Amino acid sequence: MFLWKNIDLINQTFTNEKVKYKNPYEGMYSMYNAAAVMALAKYYHIDYSYVQKVFESAPQPKGRNEKFNLNNQTCVLNLIKNPTGANEVMKVIEMDPSDKNICIVLNDNDQDGTDVSWIYDTFFEKLMKESTKKIVCSGLRANDMALRLYYGGFKGKILIETDLDAAVKSCMEAKIVTYCIATYTALLPTRNAILKGMK
């Protein structure tokens, strides 16, 4: 029998067979991945201490809840490409009660998928809290993204900025947490814009 207890998404911890573990990545979807690792270890009789070492040394993939910190400025970058994954990103951001700005970069290149109607199947409403001060939309389909937020009922500032560097910079200027969410072809350019903004 495989039973987890005390799953804590805030601190990224869980208990398995009376031992507490820390998941290296945030979000419920990452907990599913950790559960799969633990289940395989149990099935193949691999000591859990090895799993713990893997968790402790796991690398932080670029654009997967990647955090940037400099001069009291924090920015978090996430990839979105479909409703399932995007909704998990929304849940992670929703758990942060602090004031924040959000930059959403939506492209529709072939690698992204040319049909962006999936944004209407994504719960962007989870971002629409009082703690979200403004949302800046950028990318090739920035207008579509802004319209989605408007229809979703966001009462805060919705801005459209076609210049990606300027979009990210405008979010980071307030010195509150910035969350950048980007589709596939926008991910690296957004990451570069964050690094520029951190200088």
Image (cartoon, rainbow, N blue to C red):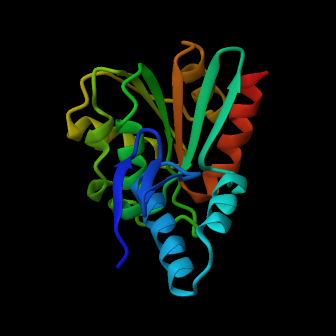
Name the spot of residue 57 as percent of width and height, x first: 73, 54
The image position of residue 144, as x and y in percent, is 37, 46
Question: Residue at image x 28%, y 20%?
Answer: 130
Question: In the rendered image, which quarter contains the C terminus?
Answer: top right
Q: Position of residue 126 (x, y in %)?
A: 28, 40
Q: Residue furthest bottom?
A: 44
Q: Is residue 59 visible?
A: no
Q: Choose between 119 and 20: the one closer to the eye.
A: 20
**Residue 118 occupies which quadrant of the picture?**
bottom left
Residue lying furthest right: 199
| Whole-percent x, y for residue 19 in the image | 48, 56
Q: Is residue 162 above or below residue 186?
A: above
Indicate whether 148 appears above or below 21. above
In the rendered image, is residue 168 in sight?
A: yes
Report the quarter where the N terminus lies: bottom left
Residue positioned 59% across, 51% down in the render: 24
Say which quarter of the image contains residue 195.
Answer: top right
Residue sitting at the far front: 18
- Front in this rendered view, residue 24 or 86: 24
* Horizontal side of residue 189 vs 144, given as left or right: right
Residue sitting nearer the eye, 3 or 103: 3
